[in-house]
Image (cartoon, rainbow, N blue to C red):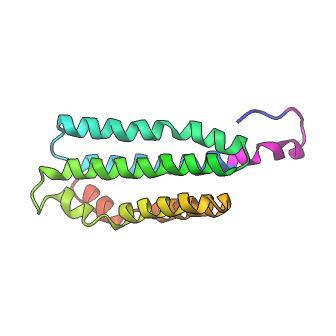
Amino acid sequence: MKVPHGTSFADLMPVVPFFLTFVMSFVYLGIYWNNHHHLLHLTDRVTGGVLWANLHLLFWLSLIPFVTGWMAENHFAREPVMLYGIVLLMAGVAYGILVKVLTLGCTPNSRLRQAVGRDVKGKLSVVFYAIALGAAFWNSWIAVAIYVLVALIWVIPDRRIEGRTFASE
C-alpha cells in the first residue's frame, strides 16, 4: 500500500481496495500459518518428502502479496481476480499434499491422522476456489465473495487439530 498524499480521511479512499485485499490476504496467510503450526505440532517425523511438500506450499503462499497487489491495483478486474484464485487453489492443493505426505507414514490411530480425519474443510475449500475461478469469468465480485467465504470458514478454529495439539502438551 502506498501512503496517500494528503491529510484528510478522504485522501485514504484510493487505497481502500489495497487495504481490503491486504486484509483478506493477511487473513489467508494467518490461516495457513496457524493450521501449519498445529499440523506440524502433531507430526512425529519429518522426511525429505515432507520438506519438499512444505516448500511447495511456501512457493504458492509467497505469490499472495504479488497477486494481492495486482488485484487491488486493477480494481478487482477479471484476470487478476482469477490469478488470485489460482494461487489460492494451488495453495489449497499444496496444503492437501503436505497433509497427505505427513500422514502417509502414520498409523491409523496416530494423533495426526485422527486430527486430520477426512479433511472436509480442506477439500471443500479447493472446490470453492474452482467454483470461484469459473464465476470470475462472469463476475469477479462473485469470485471475491467466494474467497471471503472460504476465509470465513477457516477463521473458525479447527477443533480437530487444535484440541489434540494442546491436549498433548
Residue at image location 83% in from the left, 47% down from the top: 13
Q: Does residue 108 show up magenta in the picture?
A: no
In the rendered image, which quarter is residue 149 located in? bottom right
Along the line of sight, the residue nearer the viewer: 130 or 21: 130
In the rendered image, which quarter is residue 110 located in? bottom left
Residue at image location 58% in from the left, 41% down from the top: 67
Q: Main secondary structure of the magenta part?
A: helix
As drawn, 81 above or below 152: above
Q: Residue 73, how many percent across, how many down? A: 72, 40
- Part of the protein shown in magenta: 5-19
As drawn, 169 above or below 54: below
Residue at image location 49% in from the left, 59% down from the top: 129
As drawn, 53 above or below 149: above
In the rendered image, which quarter is residue 22 located in? top right
Count of marks placed on residues: 0
Quadrant in the picture for the N terminus: top right
Q: Residue 31, how many percent across, how many down? A: 45, 52
Q: Residue 150, how many percent across, how many down? A: 50, 62
For the view shown, which residue lies furthest in the left direction? 107
Judge from the rendering whether residue 31 lies leftward or rightward of residue 136; answer left or right: left
Residue at image location 51% in from the left, 59% down from the top: 151
Q: Residue 68, how many percent across, how many down? A: 61, 42
As drawn, 74 above or below 89: above
